[in-house]
Amino acid sequence: MRKSFTHGQIHWRNMSNKTSLARDTASYVKDISIYTARGRPKTNLSHHGGLILIFLSIIGISSTSPLFAQSSLRHRKLQDQDEYEKIRTSEQQVLEALFTAAGGNDWANDDNWMVVTAADGAAGNASNGVCSWYGITCTSEGFVEKVELSDNNLRGAVPLHGLIRMPHLKVLKLDGNSLMFRSSSQLSSEDPSENTTTATASINPAVWEGRIFNELYMESMEGDTAAASGGGGGTVTSNLQYIDLSESDALGGTFSNLMEITSTFSSQFIYFPRLSDLYLSGCRLHGDFPNMAQLATFGSTLERCSLDDNGLTGTISTDFGTTMTNLRVFTASGNDLEGNLSAFGELVKIRHLNLRGNSFTGTIPEKLRCEDSTSGATLLEKLDLSRQRGISSAGTTGLTGTLPSFSQCEDLRRLDLSHNQLGGQVSENFLQSVDPLIFESASLSSNLIEGELPGKPLVRFDADAIDLRDNRITSLEIDLICDSSRSGAIAAFGCDAVLCPPGTYARIGRQEEADEPCLPCDIDTQSQYWGSISCGNDQSVGTESAPSTTPLDTPVNTPLYNEGPVIEKDVLLELYDATGGEDWFNKVGWATESTPICEWYGIQCAEDGTVESIDLGGNNLALVDGKTLPTSLFYLPSLKYLILKENTLFKYSNAELEFFKDIGAANLLEALDLSSTGLSGVSGIQGGVTLNEIHLDFNDFAGSTIPNELYSLNRLRILTMDSSNVSGKINGVFNFLKNLQVFSANDNKLDGSLLQGGYLSTLSTLRLRNNSLTGTLPTSLNLFVSLSVLDLSRQKSDESPGLEGPLLEFSQMPNLKRLDLSDNSLSGPIPGFFLAGVDPDMFEYADLAENSLVSSIPVGLKSIFSKVYLQNNKITSVDQICESALKGSNLEFFGCDAILCSPGTYNYLGRSQSYDNPCEQCNISGGAQFFGSTSCEAPKELNPKDAIELIYSSCGGPNWISSTNWMSGNVPVCQWEGIQCSGDGSIVEISLRSNGLKNAFPAREIFQAIPTLTALALEGNDVDFLFESIQDISAELTSLDLTNTNLASFDGIDIFPNLAELYAGNNAITGEFPRDILKLSNLKRLVISFNNLDGLLPDDIGTSLGKVELLVLHHNNFSGALPSSLGKLSSVHYLELQSNAFSGEIPSDLAQLSELWGIDLSDQVSKGGGFTGNLTSFNTMSGLKRLDLSKNKLEGSIPSDFLSTVETSSFEKLDLSSNLLSGKLELPSILSGIPFSSMNFSDNRFSGISADLCGNDCAMVLCAPTTFSPTGRQPSSAEYCEHCPTAVYWGTTTCPGISPTPSPIDPLPESINEKDILKSIYDSCRGEDWFNSENWMSSENICDWYGVTCTPFQDSVQSLVLSDNNLVNEVPTEVFQLPYLETLILDSNGITVDFTSIKYAFKLSSLDLSSTDLFSVEGIENAPNLLTLDISQNDFQKSIPKEIFSLTTLQQLFMGDNDFRTSIPSNIGDLKNLRLLSCPSSMLTGSIPSNIGALIDLVHINLEDNSLTGSLPLDLENLYSLTFVDASDNTLEGQLPSFSAMKNIRRLDLSNNAFSQSIPEDFLSNVNPLFFDYLDLSNNFIVGEVPSILAHFESVFLQDNLITGLDDELCDKARGGLIKQFGCDSILCPPNTFNAIGRQDSESNPCHICPSAQYYGSTSCGGAAVTEGTEITAVVQEGVEIRPSDANEEKQALAKLYLTCGGEYWTENEHWMDSNISFCKWKGVECRFGAETVTGLQLGSNNIQGTPGFISIFQLLPNLSTLNLSRNPLAGFNFNGIENSASLSELDLDATGISSIVGIGLSPSLTHISLRNNRISGFPQEIFQMKTLKTLLMSNNQLDGRIPTTFDLLPNLQTLILSSNSLSGVLDGIDFPSSLRILDLSQNLLSNSIPVTFLRGIPTSASLDIDLSGNFLSGNVPGELSRFSQMDLYLQDNRITSIDSELCSKEDWNGNDVRKYGCSGILCPIGHFANGGRQSTNTPCARCISAEYYGTSTCEGESSVTRTNMYLWPSLAFVFVLQILI
């Protein structure tokens, strides 16, 4: 549809330098129509779009103009500067004229156009003023080389010839605009008076010629131009190489007109001797195909030519093929060319020939069949000759003859010969030379191919690769073709996947999907052949005659219509008139007398010439006022298909009420599509009894029920009513439509229960997404055995729970491929046999997300677990399926997270599927409580039952030792094991001791939901418990048992004021006695033994815990004297303080503890303490039963009144052993009743024993002197104390001087299994003392042992990781005999290692022994395949172990933090494979050896903080791969190397050395500034001026040198950023000034006056530091705006942020809200130097919640430039007030959970935005409002839909990262700004080929990083990308089938990999693969049969272990490089 716009007025921008030419043309206007490239009106044209200023300045250009003298300009120098100036001036005027004529003010991008400064064009200035204009590229001399204005909304009548005569112009791209290119004669013949809106005189084109050129060039030029100067005839040579005027919809006319358009008034024609590309598609050219004289104009150099979709006619001369000798691509589809094809067979270089949709006839010539190997088109890759409509003299249509075999066409990939009349049989050698791995398709449909279809040619390809539908195939070679072993659809559907058998049909002639089977035909209309596309009498095939030529105005034998026979043409014309045919988008052929109706657009006829199909969908049909949709359509006798979708047919009328009344007349009608037509009813449609397919989607049935009329159509097989506003029940569908196969009613208002009362065994597809269905899933669904697709998702809403109840098994549905039940309320466990019957290979997905399913995932899903989505349910275990599904899955890389994220973690998918999308920790208490969480949100308020269930889900319930009745819906929670309730049903006790609980205990949720809870017992479980998480909850707990859990702190325990019992022994609590315990005044029992508490007991312990009855503090590290307040524990019964380090005397105050039953103060000596002094009598403790004072330092004798008041009959134990007691052992007589076995006096200094105590047999009490026993007394009457001459005292337990006899140690057996090896490690390294030894020695399966990871395919140890686990002693060498050991990590233990057996460790690649006691690595040199070695932080002294330099396989070597005190050995160069060398802080001395230059693969070197001397070796510059160099903090000296050869370097730190001399002029000259991170040369002795080369880099640190000047280019404010604000001061403070960092980085941190600062970049002023209150005169630059700030307001803003966003729970909140400390020192707050104003907030990962405080942040912090809120739970973040944040330039909201960025577009200054790992969907258009944006990071979101095409609206954008989203569409048409350098669109859904115009507008000199990997891009990688000299291009894992050979010579691409490996350095070829999809130094392209595309990165069927070993080069360097790129 074409549309004219009204007259308006062009509004020129206010520009003072408009030329007079522009003003003079303002009056010459013409009203024209505006079109887009596709012929539809643009929606963004301004109201004045119709007024186009016609610029005539280029029309009549004299031949004397030197602008035409292209040849002369190229071959001789300009005579003088005036001549040079004239050329540039004329070019500028031509372009100004173009701007004027083509509506420049309305262009999509007009950056810098018409803006020319006074300096531009000045003499000697090579920078032409137009060179900065958008779309203009100039040569180095400043001449225009390229004009690229594609798709830029140019419009108007533009003279073309002036542009193409620009002498240096090579590229002209004006495609996709709305231009009319006018010839001289056309413009001369027009009457200007008709085209003006004001009374202005007409403009003579000759005047413009004279004004622009003749006045500039009066002299004649030499050469061919001079010969033509007389003004008559001749040619002018053009330098153009590339012309694209396609889709301009504007050329019009014939090819001769085109020649005239390029001519001058002097009848000169342009000759194009260098033209390689010519694109004129969609230009409305018509008339005869150009003759050879015309084609000669474009020269024989033409390689690519496109003339598609024009109106060209005529035949093609044979000379065409012999003349266009270089033509490789020729497309002329959609024209009306005729004759035979012989000319095209002469195109010897042709690779792509597309002549689709013309009128060629005859046979396919031999030279197009590849049958002549000596000549012809033997290189064909793509050939399309389909849909030829020409009629031969014999009456045949299209191409005829026998189908060629194309058997010698080796390169053929795509063949389309469909819709012709080719006959014969398919040859046995059809396509026999074609490689099936690269072949795409052959379409032979709708021909006359007959006979049996042979199997040999077909079985080489996929089932759908060769399309033979709608032919005369009578049989198949079934055994071969339909072999069930073939993959894909044949395996599922047999022969039907190839062709539908006779008697059946399908829309595409075969079955591809379960819901589109081959359908049976009625018996009387049986189809005869294989591959029928409709039922009937097979009249569509089987005849060679042309369609019937019955006169169109002759009535056919039809039903009567209006009492007469119907004339089909009249019916169609009635439709045309009623629906505004003149405005249809496509009306080709309609209403023209000469065109048969069968050739009208959208009409297909049967064999007899009657209308069979009408398809006018989406064609802008709209009822004309007063008209109705003609019912006569139903009287078309052969009508089968009526498709009128996406038109406005019913929306504004009641036309449907009458439309269907005559549908019964259409007795062959099969399909009706009225989707999106405004239909509101179907009254009368029940008459269409033959209908089997109806589409009524996207209409409005006004909330009515599904129309009853449809239930009468019992033949109906397909019914779709998506988004049609129907409601009510759906039972009728299943009760009446018994043949229904597909029913879809998504997005409606259907309600009630599902399928009650009926079922359909035929139904294959049922889609009812997003309705309001309720109830349970009916078991009758299991009877739908044909179901392939079932979608009942999104029934849940705020008003309805959706589908509820248990999940069905769906176990008897072998055809099921897609199941979606997400977003409902299904509950209960997943059935064990869920989906048991599906085919794992054919099954696509089951989506059960957003339900309430519980428990674990059944093992039966192991083969399809990656296709089952269970996020946001209540899954509590994945252990079983994780273990069983390990082989060959993502579990190898991401562990169980690949199934579902574990509780306490989350990501937006609920599972980890890539390294970019890990499961992240949820820091919100109770957040992410189940497996598979997609968010980290605070849980909703729970009821008691929910809270109890949360324990189960959070703490590993499925794996508990006992869980009787847990999670049973029919058992009250009070009957669940461990739960006790009160009489009213309130939960009062939870007791789950030693029950296998793990993970964090949900304390906050429990105490919130169960306020009645009084007792909680979790003893013996591996749980974490945080008291701080429940600080704001009132709890009534009286008893708490956390013994032997993971309790780490008592902070906050005072939340339980009523606590009477606290058991927390056997944990790892450290620090002093917890003060919060002293607040528990009601405490009666306190047990905190077996912890690591230390320090003194509090003095007030006795007064604070006055009610304590049991005080157990033993086995800690308490020290000092016992406080006397212990005597205040008047109620205490037991006091157990043993095994600490107490000292001093036992306080006498203990005598007051009259209620004591037991006291244990033993063993204080072992930890360095010991009670001293005399033994206390303890004579006041009448109730005492146990007293243990052993292992102390008590002295003297036993008091006579010792224990004089105890009741001896009940006394149990007295132990005074191992003290210093002396004298004679005597006891009070009262103790005589205590048996000796209950008393122990051994190991003291007793010199005798009272006879009263033992008579003459005292050995039963103590062994006498000169004897001993281990117990110090005679063990029994049968045993005696042994002789010991050195035993002096009574009761000796050892015999000094006698050593025990060592016991022999059995040697390890020669052949030992893996379990024995691990046992030896356990035994040798004291496994019983390890911090974690879970399952060691107790489980039979070693794969369950802590730290052990086994191989996927056998239970062999693959890795052993025991970091920081308290291992000691020497690790047995047998560890290296573990046959599959790949990784051994034993860091941070007290071990050494025996390397004797490392020679057997053939698979060991990674060894980490850092932070151990290692001092020698003798034997390690025999390690056969070690890649990574870490021996940092060890005890190596005085030398680097020489053995290391024999490990030639090493790729990563970490040796930092040792005490080598030696130089780097010269044989460092022997480590040829080394990529990372890290040896910081290791006392290295001497110089860096030159042999380090032999490490050519080195990427990372870190030698910081050593004592290296000398200069940097020149060999270092040979390391081209280096990206990271850190040699800071040494004493290196001399001249800085230039590093000019090291183009990959990203970080260079040479600070704090002694380098002198100046910085080389070519320093870092080949480094790409976009990827460079920083350069630090600070604190050296560098002198002189800083060279201009450093202007390329942003982060350069040069302070504290001896620098005396800065190159002017460094301070050019055009560089932007801080330089624009602060000039040179932002680089270095000038002499006589200083500040703390040596440069100005903000308005508040200027350079201060300091007369003693002699050099640039001083950081101090004679040693005086600037302190608060120091008065300094600031140097303020002129014109710099300093925004005023109010410190009080800023502090209030920060305080509000703290108070409204949960500040007290932030992870880091140090100093916040402290009124005594400046807010500039609050954690995360950054202020300007010397000023109290906030410039940055670094609050990432800080548990910030909510958003109310941020509006004040935006409004009240005027100098805030950086805001980092990443990794905080801020899902509701909004951008209110951001428009007030004028300084904000950097915003980081990564991983905050936000889903909307509405309002961000109002930001006035944002340059860097990071929004990664969030939930943003669609593509927010507000992004395009931010013109300052430089960096946009939005990876890992939910971006979807078509990728935007207007990124060029962001003129400063440099980095665009949109990876890992769901963006779709094609790359064609996307415009990026010229500033773009980094683009990442990987892991999306982009499709089609990479267009030749991709990255248009970006300078070819730019160095680019482009990542398009992991999409669905197909076809060829175009050679046009070779225009970029430097690019890193990532294309792996697409569907690429070829690479243009031009790209394979781009030596600087992909880090020089293309130089080394050619095409493989871009992508591995088909049949190969590599990690990363291309070859690099350590990743060759390996053979892989299953790799069907270029760039495959994984090989199906390849052992994952093999792949890992093959490509396992250490990860650290790779990760480092990746971080740099990001």
Image (cartoon, rainbow, N blue to C red):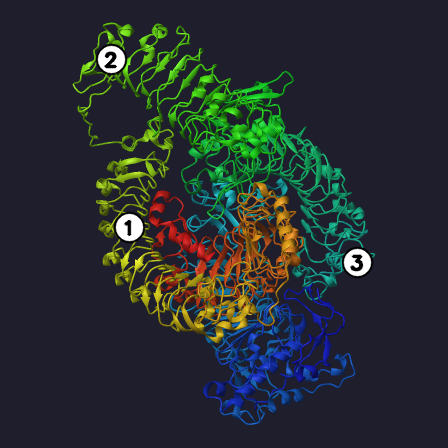
Query: Which secondary structure lies at badge 1?
Result: loop
Frontmost of labels 2 and 1 is 2
The amino acid type of the residue labelled 1 equals: Asp
The residue under the point 17% across, 23% down is 1298
Task: State the CA–CA distance, disc 2 to disc 1.
Answer: 59 Å
Frontmost of labels 3 and 1 is 1
Task: State the CA–CA distance, disc 3 to disc 1.
Answer: 93 Å
Pick whichever of labels 2 and 1 is earlier in the sequence. Answer: 2
Foreground residue among 462 and 1557: 1557
User: x%, y% of residue 810?
Assistant: 55, 31
User: x%, y% of residue 275?
Assistant: 50, 76
In the rendered structure, the answer to whether residue 721 lies left or right of residue 1453 reads right
Q: Which residue is mark 1?
A: 1459
Residue 1972 visible from this viewpoint: no
Foreground residue among 1719 and 961: 1719
Task: State the CA–CA distance, disc 3 to disc 2.
Answer: 130 Å
Q: Residues within 10 Å of mark 3 (few under 14, many from 20)?
A: some
Pick whichever of labels 3 and 2 is earlier in the sequence. Answer: 3
Q: Which residue is mark 3?
A: 624
Q: Cβ–Cβ below 8 Å for labels 3 and 2?
A: no
The amino acid type of the residue labelled 3 equals: Val
In the rendered structure, the answer to whether residue 668 lies left or right of residue 292 reads right
Pick whichever of labels 3 and 1 is earlier in the sequence. Answer: 3
Q: Is 1953 rendered above or below residue 1419?
A: below
Query: Which secondary structure lies at badge 2?
Result: strand
Query: Which secondary structure lies at badge 3?
Result: loop
Q: Which residue is mark 2?
A: 1248
The amino acid type of the residue labelled 2 equals: Gly
Q: Is 271 rendered above or below residue 1352?
A: below
Q: Cβ–Cβ below 8 Å for labels 3 and 1?
A: no
Q: Residues within 10 Å of mark 1 (few under 14, many from 20)?
A: some
